Amino acid sequence: METAASEVTLPTLAGALCGGALVVGVSLWALWLKKRRRQERDERPPQEEKILRPAGYFAMGRVEELGDRLTWGMVRAVLAGIGLERRREPFGR
């Protein structure tokens, strides 16, 4: 009995599944072994909290401050415009 090249047989499928399971199993075993060795050595980072600020931290603070100043300046300008309109009505008549 001849099989076509594209036909999947049971032994081919079983071999592919066993090969995939072997790769996954070895990968998981290697990760477990690495974690176990790290625990045995009591390996931990030298500093628990972050010491350095992220890149651009100062610039982000300046941009936020300038944005706040711009927003409040626009609010003041709008409120002043409303106040000026109200003051002009009684005097304009």
Image (tube, helix red, strand yellow):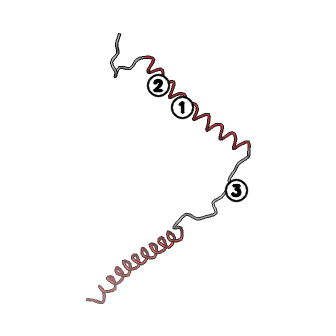
The quarter of the picture where the N terminus appears is top left
In the rendered view, tell whether residue 81 sits above or below residue 6. Answer: below
Give the number of the disc on residue 71: none
Residue at 61 percent of width and 38 percent of height = 31
Q: Secondary structure at mark 3?
A: loop
The quarter of the picture where the C terminus appears is bottom left
Looking at the image, tell me whether mark 3 or mark 1 is earlier in sequence order. Answer: 1
Between residue 55 and residue 3, name the one nearer to us: 3
Residue position for label 2: 16
Residue position for label 1: 23
Q: Secondary structure at mark 1?
A: helix
Query: Mark 3 or 2, which is nearer the eye?
Result: 2
Count residues near mark 2 (Cα–Cα under 10 Å), then give few for <14, some for 14-19, many for 20+. Answer: few
Residue at 69 percent of width and 44 percent of height = 38
Between residue 72 and residue 89, name the one nearer to us: 72
Q: Position of residue 46 (x, y in %)?
A: 70, 56
Q: Position of residue 47 (x, y in %)?
A: 68, 58
Count residues near mark 1 (Cα–Cα under 10 Å), then give few for <14, some for 14-19, many for 20+. Answer: few
Q: Is residue 1 left or right of residue 60?
A: left
Residue at 38 percent of width and 78 percent of height = 79
Give the number of the disc on residue 46: 3
Disc 2/disc 1 C-alpha distance (Å): 11 Å
